[in-house]
Image: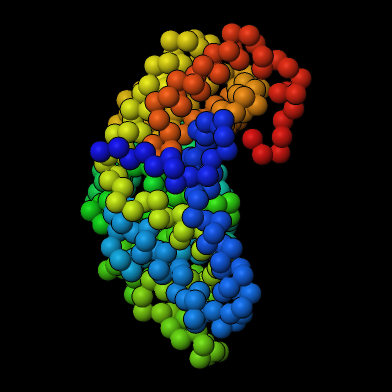
Amino acid sequence: MSVLRKELFDLPPGVIYLDGNSLGPLTKQVAARLTQLVTDEWGNGLIRSWNKAGWMAQPQRVGDMIAPLLGAPAASVMLGDTLSIKVYQALSAALELRPERRVVLTDSGNFPTDLYMAQGLLQSLDRGYELRIVAPEQVSAALDERVAAVLLTQVDYRTGRLHDMQAITQRAQAVGAVTIWDLAHSAGAIPLALEQAHCEFAVGCTYKYLNGGPGAPAFIYVRPDLIERVRPCLAGWLGHAAPFAFDPDYRPAASIERMRVGTPPVLQLAALEAALAVWTDVDMQALRRASVALAERFIAEVEARCPALTLASPRDPEQRGSQVSFSFDQGYAVMQALIARGVIGDFRAPDIMRFGFTPLYLDEGDIVAAVDALQVILDGELWRAPEYQVTQAVT
């Protein structure tokens, strides 16, 4: 069964979008939903819409919509804030579950913000914690009884390398460590089974494969049996057991609601909720097969026609997510030339050209046409044009 739903996306004519791994495209339902919210719910309903339009319930409601895509049960996923905040929440809670241990294990492929948040938290705690960074393939071997928490991004943002969540979680729990998985490049891209993996925490953003739009809120998953044990380090008023009682002392909610912090971003949550409609009845196994097929065709075409590029992703599709990266010493300029021709990917320093494969709106014809453009640029050295040499603020 095909998972292609291109008609549900509002993509510009003539554009082949291979950057859904960084920012998902606009879905056609979003603009109408935001217009309705602004003119009716906000414009006419005013403050009454917190109740009448269900604004206050959005974080939990949208969390329950995302949960099936994560392989998580209802009432275990909460939306709100940014991914950085959710990493901070999860890591702080994990450390409190293992108060006698002092090592946080991560890998060199982790996204920098995860490392920064960990560094900042451990410095603030000032209790002799160590952030131990190892190569991705050394994570399992580095696990021992000193490790309190394992903080990993499942899919490497640069190369697409894929960690085995089930195996690492089992190994971590065998030595008594708590696991935190960053699913920023996984959610909506590959089949996930958080409940089966039995990991303690997971976090992720919703503006990539879930198409929630720029600045869309992040999510946090807490394994249900731990929810009432987890102490929120950010004791926001909406995580209180009775926020509108306005008690001077904090009492955490008895549910996943305790992971809420501040006022929900209503417009962003509404956009995300509308965008999630494209996932109705999508078979994630079928989507994964289609994604692999597109990526394999792309790799074969590039290697046959663009020999100057070097595959930087794992060759085995079982070992990568839904993106493929190639390295080239002038990768930034090549990507700018490619974007100018309507094929949009992106670049990560020092020399990585990234391409995301989203079968909801990409087909085999798009892949071949993208490589056609890439070959023209490389064969003609069109990337040497001065306008492609200027590095922009966002790469």
Q: Residue at x 61, y 78 (%)?
A: 44
Residue sitting nearer the eye, 259 or 289: 289
292 relative position to 90: left or right: left
Residue sitting nearer the eye, 28 or 175: 28
Which part of the image, by quadrant, shows the N terminus? top left
How many numbered discs, if any? Answer: 0
Q: Residue at x 43, y 10 (%)?
A: 304
Q: Position of residue 121 (x, y in %)?
A: 54, 59
Res. 210 visible in picture? yes
Asked which quadrant contains residue 300, the reply is top left
Q: Position of residue 257 (x, y in %)?
A: 42, 74
Residue sitting nearer the eye, 325 or 104: 325
Give above or below for 5 relative to 334: below
57 relative position to 392: left or right: left
Asked which quadrant contains residue 350, the reply is top right
Q: Residue at x 56, y 56 (%)?
A: 31
Q: Position of residue 13 (x, y in %)?
A: 57, 34
Res. 108 visible in picture? no
Give above or below for 31 relative to 49: above
Asked which quadrant contains residue 36, the reply is bottom right
Q: Residue at x 62, y 21 (%)?
A: 334
Q: Position of residue 99 (x, y in %)?
A: 39, 65
